[in-house]
Image (spheres, rainbow, N blue to C red):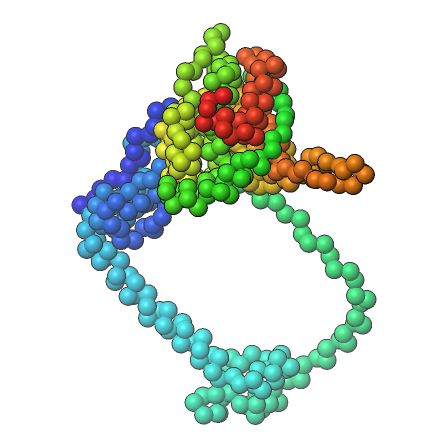
Amino acid sequence: MAIEIKVPNLPESVSSATVATWHVKAGDTVKREQNLVDLETDKVMLEVPATADGVLTEIRIQPGATVQAGDVIGILTEGAAAAAPAAPAAAAAAPVKAEAATSAASAEDVQGPAVRKLLAELGLSAEGIPASGRGGRLTVEDVKAYAASKPAAAPKAAAPAPAPVAAAPAAPRSEERVPMTRIRARIAERLKEAQNTAAMLTTFNEVDLSAVDAIRGKYKDQFEKTHGVKLGYMSFFVRAAVEALKKFPAVNASIDGGDIVYHNYYDIGIAVSSPRGLVVPILKDADLLGLAGVEKAIGVFGTKAKDNKLSLEDLTGGTFSITNGGVFGSLISTPILNPPQSAILGMHGINERLLDVELNADGTVKRLKKGKMMYLALSYDHRIIDGREAVLFLRTIKECLEDPARLLLNL
């Protein structure tokens, strides 16, 4: 029985999809629930599984084409027996391939190295030369006899003297044009929207993460043993951001037309790199999660992003975002807003720096104070967030991270 493979119902607000990759070819046997094809939307990647065991007999829509919900993109014939008709054609092709291979091998066998060299020197082809060797092999004598029986060829003109060796030419210039993926196009659209709409500014500070690092060093093994997840820096930043957002509600708000919408919940977007580009899954109700809960959720997001398994629900919403360019070695940057959010926090690389020097009475060094320093950047929409609020918000995050006890005491 033939089964139509259709584009499934698309998520709300997604009008179309692009056929990204077929994972099977026409004629392949497939199993029920096996992923046949990936459909790319501007938000998530959708999988289309087989609804029954059988054979993919037809692919109607090729990669790169735009499709709508309900479009038929292929045909699945139910039952493994459907593969049988392909067998005679393959069998019929086998003798032809074998014959061609035999002919090629025979042509090679009748010419030994000495014969091939002589043929090349005389400018002759083995075809038409009578062979007297064992098994029909062509001998050197056969070639010489054949050449002697042919009229003498006109002498070749002397080869010109070799030209001076010139410098090697530059490699040919080339370029490649590929269509922008839907998610990349969507990212470009949203980032340009942020630049065109928001009155975007960035303020900076720096934070000494020595105290956070000490906690991680002391408890990381016990933390991982208890919670089954490693204790990273991001959970501290999420917790610090939540405390700062509580103090400065405008940073957690958004503009809707002529209104300011103040959110009484804290859904934090965590920017994650994926094979399809930058995605920002949302950590819902981050204020209700402890350090372990944050780390577990971020781990799940990372795995989903890597495997293109993030759902539309994972990416929907968000009142504030955090991006960590430090994992790629960034020293400082100005992150761009993720509309309709009004602010985003940028983390960067951690570098050990000398902060202070304590001297003895005689001027010699008594103690060096070093810190594990990171630059912080807060980009914000000046239409809704004043400079004072932005600076104090960033300072609150700095204070929470330099004295992590504040996170426990809600100070």
Q: Nearer the viewer, residue 76 or 264?
A: 264
Left or right? Give the position of 174 relative to 135.
right
Residue at figure coordinates x 46%, y 24% from the top left? 409
* Residue 303 falls in image quadrant: top left
Q: Is residue 85 above or below residue 194?
A: below
Residue 254: % across, % down: 48, 15
Query: Could you say where residue 51 lies in the image, as x and y percent from the top left?
Result: 23, 42
Whether residue 269 is visible here, answered yes or no, is yes
Which quarter of the rendered picture does the N terminus lie within? top left
Q: Residue at x 68, y 54 (%)?
A: 171
Whether residue 265 is situated above or below residue 231 in the rendered picture = above
Instruction: Identify the image quadrant of residue 366.
Output: top right
Total marks placed: 0
Regarding residue 45, the answer to whether it shows in the image is no
Closer-to-camera residue (241/341): 241
In this rendering, would 192 be left or right of 160?
left
Q: Is 29 left or right of 368, judged from the image as shown?
A: left
Residue in the picture at 70% in, 40% down: 367
Residue reaching furthest top?
258
In front here: 343 or 104?
343
> What residue lies at 49% left-to-right and 21% top-to-bottom?
411
Counting from the top left corner in percent of width and height, residue 198 is at 57, 17
Q: At which x and y percent is residue 332?
A: 64, 33
Is residue 321 or residue 123 the one in the foreground?
321
Q: Please say if 14 is above or below 82.
A: above
